[in-house]
Structure formats: structure tokens, C-alpha cells
Amino acid sequence: MNIRHAKTVLLGVLAVFLVLSLFASRINGYWLNNLYDIGIGIIMAVSLNLINGYTGQFSLGHAGFMAVGAYTAAVITNQFGELNVFAESGVFAVALFAGGLAAALAGLLVGVPTLRLRGDYLAIVTLGFGEIIRVILQNMDVVGGARGLSVMHGWTNLFWAFGLAAVTVYVIASLVNSTYGRGFIAVHDDEVAAEAMGINTTKYKVTAFVVGAFFAGVAGGLYAHSKQFLTPSGFGFMQSITFVVMVILGGMGNTIGVILAAILLTLLPEGLRLVSGIEHLPGIAAERPLNWIGETRMIIYSLLLIVLMLTRPQGLFRLKKSPLAKH
Amino acid sequence: MKIRHGQFLLVAAAAIWLAGCKPASDSGATGGDTIKVGEFASLTGSEASFGQSSHKGTQLAIDEINAAGGVLGKKIQLITEDNQSQAGQSATVVRKLISSDGVVAMLGEVASSRSLEAAPICQQSKIPMISPSSTNPKVTQVGDYIFRVCFLDSFQGGKVLSGFAHDTLKAKNVAVLKDVKSDYSVGLAKFFTEGFTASGGKVIAEQNYSSGDKDFSAQLTAIKAANPDAVFVPGYYTEVGLIALQARQLGLNVPLFGGDGWESPVLVSIGGQALDGDYFSTHFSPDDTSTNVQNFVKHFKDKYGETPDSMAALGYDSALILADAIKRAGGTDGQKVRDAIAATKNFQGISGVITIDENRNASKPAVVVTIKDSKIKFVETIAP
Amino acid sequence: MTEFLQQIINGLAFGSILALIALGYTMVYGILRFINFAHGDVFMLGAFAGFYLAPKIATLIPLPSILGGLAVLVASMVICAALGVLIERLAYRPLRRSPKLTVLITAIGVSLFLEYTGQFVFGAAPKKFPQILPVYPIAKIGGLSLNSNQVIVLGTTLLLLFVLRFIVLKTKMGMAMRAVSFNPEAAALMGVNTDIVISFTFALGSALAAAAGILWAVNYPAIDPLMGILPGLKAFVAAVLGGIGNLPGAALGGIIIGVIETLVSGYVSSTYRDAIAFAVLILILLIRPSGLLGKKEVEKV
């Protein structure tokens, strides 16, 4: 990505979505919600890409960071949200940022102890951390525990969702493409060699976790103010896997690919839902002949995952050589 | 390469925009020759057994209504969406049912947390929603378009079960073993504890488990050491059967009792003799010899090859009440249907005689039953 | 005192099943350096195989009986061994040269596939596992409770531990397995048919998972398609605790996790029971990553 134009592109995207968000009422509520999910998915996937893709740390607990951000932002807006319209955006921004910070702290807590771990072990431990976060939230009565937390203000809109997605992409892409950022890739390729070259692998690994977690927390805040109801079980292992699949599908370390994968995977369940709901097919008498797709959706999803790994593990969207060309 | 990616993104965005640029469909559209009713349930995932049960009951009701000619001369088209037992999905599918499918009313859900997710959306779109078996009081508090056909946990825990424990079981010290992962269990435990302590009883031990657990020996051993008169287990049948088995194995022989989550043929098949002398409150008793209950059980068995549980019965009732309300409203206008549902009085449901009270909850008696020789026996009815 | 003893018994009973599952995990990891995420689901399939086979076997040998129970056990072990070989052939063999991550994701995909297909085929509601073994209460002294099913699990785990050690240390196939675990290419060069060895390893691991599934179902007779997720994860933690790749370590790890979980649950708080296994995992990886019985591996540059 060409950095010189990137700033202009960023501002352009922000402006476009600010305008679009004003016309949001024209859009079918269901599709609007899907668009928010896409924006949130992009942030989650790109932030995870920093940890998994660029730095090569296999994290299976990303949804945990999202949860921390979601609950933090929700608690803040529930407490301080009753203000006039102009201050609303301010409170929202503060809440999202606070959510990101809280998640970043969690990222620090996860990143430091896992420094010495590799591959499989790291995966399981991050999964464990994700589960621990979920269990803690489940037992915190002050945020509703298992009974859930209602979020009073549904402030997420196109501007916030896609604007923040654009900011995330900009920040992370800039980070990785800078000279400092080469360090991430060095850690990914060969940690021992990197250490030997004087690169502080600890700092990079922890930075990856903290930055990745921060943006996941922001995405969590957006999620909270879109669905308006949070339960700890919504941030479990299955959620983390979805984001991991986005990164793998897009091609680890391939930012554009990961964005496309996020869009595709967010729309895939809805697409399958649409297909399974088709009322009539020519030549078949039965109603909703493809209904079985709905019932077998998760089976299809897991098969797709296996087939993808067997046939094109480098990701669907990797077209040009990436800096991680070795893999 | 960059240009190709950029073009792809642009095309994708445009496609979504175009797909989305439909006018928000007006609720209450009576055009067409069917009445579209939406249902959202957990058909797959960790709570699939509950969602599938509820859906089967609902579908049976709709089929019977349509076979008898439908409502106001039109057939009801039940559009069911699966939320995969996952948080966040109920909101998505309910939005789809309202905005894309144009349903005039919503049926769902079993779990209070998923009902709470969908209720604000239905309320905002002025689509009447009837939950078959969400028992958390907060659900109907969301707004005046949200109803339920089951009793509340504040009634079930606070009055029925705590009263039963205190008056009938004559228990002074009770231990509570709740499912910390289930909002239903946590809520019911809280209301029971409040009611029981208010009437002079004491909760001397509290232990937790998570749905999906199979080994409860640690918790049960600790409870046994506290020497309670009875143990309150406000969980689901999926775990209660095993809890009963292990309790008896460990020599914990005091009565266990719980709520409507126990209700299922699977409970007795797993727990067997260990359940003898235990009690639970529920919505309907399969012992009920009234014709409509027996017909329901028979038709359910014919269609699905299994005995219905209380979620199926409530799913059935929610559909019946909705159809009845549409008939009384004379159309599918949201406001009129809502008012008709709110005016439901003494409706003869499978799960009891249902009257919708001013808080849009079902005022109906609970039934307490006991288990003996793997059979469920009626004990008493407790009215609100 | 009675309470404490009973809790210890509870922990041992629960832990010995975890130990049995962990044996399969650790063996596959030891030979192939690969966490088989789907192990917990093969465990589940073993239980379901037993569920469907039991009525058929009952027509030949009356149940519950020792012979009948054994027949069900062996039959489902055979079925799952075949299944394990099939999964390896289709999903893992093509990826032998691929990066670890790819195989891990594939394993997750297989696991999800088995779970959801199970829900579709068997139905999501729990089913009662039939009684295949006769039950005898063993200890009823001083208010303590222990029955034969629990003792059988412990006994089977120990028995299988010795059988496995025998296979790995004293047979030709075992030697081949050890060779492949040290260096697959070198082993191939020395004439070892790595394909056969790997298939055999998977077959053995899957058979162990099936045995664990049957014994689990005997003790906790409610089976459902998602039953393998949590036990599988806890067993993995047990394997790591004991030193992954180390057979006695896995058994030890399972027992320890079972006892810790039970004691914390009974005396401290049962709220966090699920998280205990993960907390143990994190602690052990921080303090002694090679596990209790494992040896320190020096990282070659």
C-alpha cells in the first residue's frame, strides 16, 4: 500500500461514510445490520491479522478482547449516555476508546506470559485466556452475568463502523509497512535469527497483542451498540474461530485479502440463509427445496474449512507476493 | 493488483447498497393470500434440543390451523430462522424476518437472553412478539408489543417453589445447586432464595455447575456435608437426570426439587429410579386427561414420533394465541393484533388456562408434580 | 474428614477418565507432533457407537454383563479405529508437508464437522446410555461412596497404560513409531513405512478415545453430540501437565486435574470450575513447560 496516498484515501473513506450514514434510513434494517457486521468483522480480522498473520503468533482467543471492549463501552454509555445529541458522539467516542484501552490491557496480560510459547501451545493458551475472560464475565453480576447486559443506546452507524474500520486498516498497515514494522515480520520468519540481529522480539510480540487487542476492543464496543444486548457466551471459542478463519482465508499477512475474507465470511451465513429460503425451484414441486442447507449450514461451513486447507491454504485472495513470501 | 482489489471492493459495496435499498417494509401489510409469521429459534448448536422442541410445537399448531382453513380465510406462512444458539444471531434473523420477509408478528424464543436480544427490535418495528417460554421478567418489560405465554420466574421461584418447599416439604434448610451458565437457572435461583428466606427458611449451601457438565460429585459432596432438608436444582433436564443419579450414589437422599426446566421425557430416561421422591413445577401435566391435551400429545407423536415436552406445549400455545388474536383483531395491523393479544382472557391452552395480564405476562397456575417409578404424578396446583 | 475423603475419591474417579482420554492425545502428539483437536469428538463417536451397538449385541449376549460390556467396548474401539484411519487419510495425510497451522485449522474443521454432523444425525438432545456393565457398590463404609464402574475406569486406564507402553517400547511397530517421532524422514530412509505407522498411530489413538467414550458413558449415562468438547480440552491440559508425549505423564496429569477440579469445586467455589483446567494449563506452561514428567527440550537453532 502506497503510504503517500493512504492518508487521502482514509479521509475520503471517512467522508463518504459520514454522508452515507445520513441516508441510512433508506436501507432495509436487515442489510444495514449486515453492513455493520462487515465493518466490525473487518476490524476484528485486520487486528487479528497483526497478531496471527504478520507476527506469527497463533491466537485463538481474540473474541475475549472483543468482549472486554464490548462490556466496557456498554457500561460507560449506559451510565453516562443521557445527554444531548451533540455530546452523544463524544460519549460514544470516549466509550469506544475506553473499551479499546481495557482490551489492550487484557492483551498485555495475555501477551506477556505467552512469550515463550510457540504454535500449538500458544493456540491452546490463548484459547484458555479467551475462555477465562468469558467465565469471569459470566460470574460478574454487575454486568448481568449469564443473564446478559442490555445496551441502552444503539449508536453504531455506517460512519462509525466503516470509519473505524478504515482507521484500523490505516493504522495497522502503516505500522507494519514502516521500518519499525519490519520487526513483526522478522519475528514471524525466524525468532532466533531476529534476536540474534538485535531485534527485541519480546517488545514486538507484546506490541502485536496489545495493538491487536485494542482494535478488537473497539470493534467490541461497536458490536455492543449495534446488537444492544451482550451475553458472555457470545464471545466464546466459536467466535474466535470465525475471525481466525477470516485471517487464514484472506492469506495471513495479506491485509486486502483479509478484508475481502471478512466481507465474504460475514455475508456467507446470510447468503446460505437466503439460498436455503428460496421458495421454489423450477422442476421441483416441494416448497423450500433447499431448506436442508439451513439445517446443515454449520456442517457445510466446517467442510469448507477443511477443503480450503486442503486445496488452498495460502488463502483465497493472495494474488501478489507478500512480504511473508516464504509461507 | 491494487486496482483489481479496489474494483472488487467497489462492486461488492455497490451490490450490498442496492440489495439494501428496499423500503423498510410496512408491518401489517395484508396484501397477498398468506399471513406471514416469523419464528426464531435455536435449531442447531448447544441448545438445539430446546429450540427444536419449541419449533415442533409451533409448527404443529400452524399446520393444524391451516388444515382447518387458516385465519380469516388465509393460510399462515410460518417463516422460521435458526439462531444457532449463538448470541447476536437472534438480532440478525429477527431483523431479516421483519425487514426482508415482512412478517406481521414474531414467535420466539425459549431462552430469555435471546428473547431480550430480539425484543427491542420487535418493539421498535411495532411487530407483536410472543415468547413461548422465556421466564425472565425483563423480557416483557422491553415494551408493550412483547408478550409471553408462560409464567414468570418470580412467580415460579418466588411463590410456587419456595412456598412448596416451606409448606409442603416442610424444609427449613435448603441447598441450591444452580447452572451458572444459564440465565434461566440463575434467575430462578435468585427468586427462590428471596421468597424462601422471606418466609423464614435458610439457604445453607450454594453450589454451581455449567450446562454441559457431567460430573457433579464435588458439588453434591459439599452439599451433603451441609446436611440440608432438600436441594433446589433450578436447572435443565439435560443435567438434572445425572445430578439425581450421582446424588443418590453419594448417599444424598433428601428430596431434590426444581422448575419447568426439568420437564422432558429424557429426564426420567436418564435419571430413572434415582428421581423417585423428587419434585418439580411445570406448565402442564401429561397426566392431564383433558381431551385437548391428549389430542395434542397424540398428534405430536404421530407427526414427530416422540412425546412432547413443556417447550413443545408452550410453542404450540404461543402459535394458537397469536392466531386467535389475529382473528379477533380482524386483520394483521400491528397495533390491533397487539391489543388483541393483550386482551386474551381464559384461553384454553395446552399448557393451562392463559390470561394475559397488564404486564403482558401469562397469569396461569403452575402444577407441581413428583416422580415415582419413573412416572410423573400430579401433586398440587398453585394459582397466582 | 469423610467429606474430604469422598472428594478425593470423586476426583480420582473423574480424573481417571480424563487420564484415559489424555493417553490418546499424548500418544498422537508424541508421534506426530500434532494436537488432534478432533480427539474429543472421536471420544463422542465411541460413546454413540456403543449406544447403537448395545441393543444389537444384547441379542447375542445378554446385557448388562461383563462379557456383553466388553463386547460393546471392543466393537466401538474397532469402529473408531477405522474412523480414525479414515480421517487421517482424507484430512491430515495430504497436509503432511504443510505448516503446522494449516493442519491445526484442518483439525478444528474436522472437529466442528463431527460435532455438527452428530447433531444432525443423532439429534441434539441427550440420550440415555444403556447399562452394559453390572454395577456393584464397593465402599459404603463411613458414609463413603464408590462403585464398581469408577474402579473399572481406573483399572482400565492403568491396564491400557501398560499395554501402550508395551507396544511402544517392546514391539517392532512401537520401534517404528518412536523412529517416526524422532525424525520422519530418517525413519523413511531406514525403510520404515511412515504411512502405515501413522495410520496405526491414529487407529490406536482413536481406539483409546472410543474406550474412554464408552467408560465415560457408563459412568455418566447421558450422551450428546457436543459431549466431547470440554473433556477433550481438559484431557489436553492433562497431557500437557504430565509432559506431552509422555504416557505415564498423561495418566498422572489426568488424575491431578480431576482431583484439583474436584477440590476447588467442593471447597473454594464451583463457579469457576470450567476455568480451572485452563488456569492450570497457563501455570504449567509458565513454570514448567515440559510438564511434570517430560524432559526439557533444547531448541536447536
Image: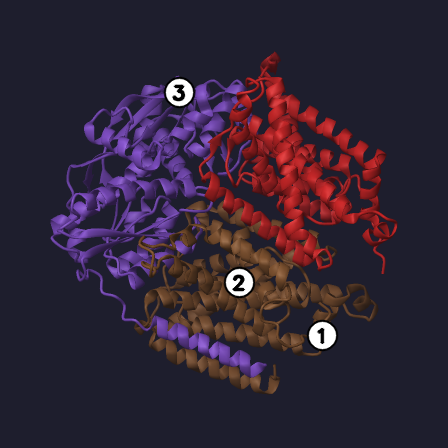
Chain colours: A brown, B purple, C red
Residue sticking out furthest to the right = C190
Measured in 3D between alpha carbons, the distance from the residue under mark 3 to the one under mark 1, in whole angstroms, is 68 Å
Q: Considering only order in the chain, which callout, 1 or 2, is on the residue closer to the N terminus?
A: 1
Residue sticking out furthest to the top = C141
- Dot 2: few (<14), some (14–19), or many (≥20) neighbours within 10 Å? many
Residue in view at x 29 percent, y 39 percent: B314
Along the line of sight, which residue is nearer the eye, C198 or C178? Answer: C198
Which amino acid, mark 3? Ser
Residue under pointer 2: A217
| Quarter of the figure that contains the N terminus of chain C | top right
Chain letter behind tag 2:
A
Residue in view at x 45 percent, y 39 percent: C123
Can residue A109 be seen here? The reply is yes
Q: Whole-percent x and y of residue A115? A: 72, 58
Can residue A103 be seen here? The reply is no
Q: Which numbered mark, 2 or 1, is in the foreground of this view?
A: 1
Which amino acid, mark 1? Arg
Residue in view at x 42 percent, y 63 percent: A271
Residue under pointer 3: B374
Q: Which mark is residue A182?
A: 1
Q: Circles 2 and 1: CB distance less than 8 Å?
A: no
Mark 3, secondary structure of its residue = loop
* Quarter of image, res A51: bottom right
Residue in view at x 45 percent, y 70 percent: A161
Which amino acid, mark 2? Gly
